[in-house]
Amino acid sequence: MNKPQKFRNLDDAPHQRSFSGLLRWRLERLQQWKPIGKGAPAARVDNDGRALRGAPRDAITWIGHASWLVQLARTSLVIDPVLFDRIAVTIPRLVAAGLHIEELPSLDAVLVTHNHMDHMDAPSLRALAARPENPLFIVPAGLGAWFSARGFRRVHELQWFESIEVGGAKVTFVPAQHWSRRSLMDEDQSHWGGYVIEGNGHRVYHSGDTAYFSGFSLIRERVGAPTAALLPIGAYEPRWFMQSQHMNPEDSAKAFTDLGAQRFFAMHWGTFVLTDEPVDAPPAFIRTVWNDLSLDPHALSIPAVGETIYL
């Protein structure tokens, strides 16, 4: 019997996720009495979605963690939707989702970057599939079978640098340095990556989960510099374990420069306790890095959960 295809990072870059590494991380927590989860969560603003459901302007709205609503060229897309009060049963939200299911506009597509539970939340996906507009689900190569087996009717897989037209927008799946696993038996059997959404003169990039790697320059070369780069600033400690799979703010600033992006929008922080840094450490860290690198202060945005930014 043929073995399932295993997906790889660019240049076969490794990622640290062995059981022994995970065990070492947990033991370090116990030995050092690390106070996990300290600090204030991300701020939240009320957003009932009314303006987003009308005649939409080109805009992005942070729903929390890696979840975004992107509206370009009268096309509405949601990326990595996690819309309920916890993930993986045991991990509660620190701050409510910025938009609830009923507050979202009619969606043309739902984009999933990879199959980890804080990005691919089954209850949220099922709720979106049940909506009357029947959105298209765009997923990485190898992941379509998971959706089809669960009755999702409109699913489209993409390989890196493959594109699809959705409404008035173009969606391109782009590389990331990460990994995939949904169960004990499916490690790296589906791909991982980010998305570039183009429309109406804008180019919005969502990185998904990624370490810092040469792919950011490649994305700029192959797809073009983003108008808006949605980049993670959290889930980075301890570095010996996370560096090969998650960026810290210093890495994210370098990625922004490599991409040639016009604006940086912070995500992947302040919503769940997943790693060891204080919950509210990432914004201060990225501001310090930004200042040290003498980057344009007007280019850095740290939105509140629920905040809409018009492009």
Image: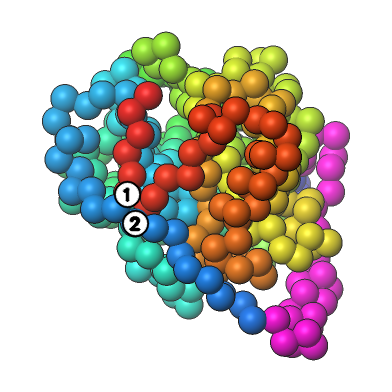
Indicate which disc, 1 or 2, sits on the residue closer to the N terminus: 2
Classified by dominant secondary structure, the portion drawn in magenta counts as helix
Q: Which residue is mark 2?
A: 44
**Residue occupying the point 51% across, 47% down:** 267
Which of 41 and 117 lies nearest the eye of the viewer?
41
Left or right: 299 in relation to 15: left
Asked if the magenta segment contains residue 165, the reply would be no
State the image coordinates of residue 308 (x, y, percent, origin top left).
Answer: 32, 39
Callout 1 environment at 10 Å: few (<14), some (14 to 19), or many (20+)? many
Asked if the magenta segment contains residue 17, the reply would be yes
What's under tag 2, amino acid-wise? Arg
Specify whether residue 46 is in view: yes
Q: Which residue is mark 1?
A: 306
What's under tag 1, amino acid-wise? Gly
**Residue occupying the point 33% across, 63% down:** 96
**Residue occupying the point 69% across, 44% down:** 289
Which quadrant of the view contains residue 229?
top right
- What whole-number distance in Å separates the C-alpha atoms at marks 1 and 2? 6 Å
Which of 52 and 256 lies nearest the eye of the viewer?
256
**Quarter holding the C terminus?**
top left
Callout 2 environment at 10 Å: few (<14), some (14 to 19), or many (20+)? some
- Residue 157 vs 283, above or below: the answer is above
Which secondary structure lies at badge 1? loop
Determine whether label 1 and label 2 are within 8 Å by CB: yes
Q: Residue furthest top?
A: 201
> Which residues are the magenta region?
7-34
- Residue 21 vs 305, above or below: the answer is below
State the image coordinates of residue 254 (x, y, percent, origin top left).
Answer: 72, 35
Specify whether residue 146 is in view: no
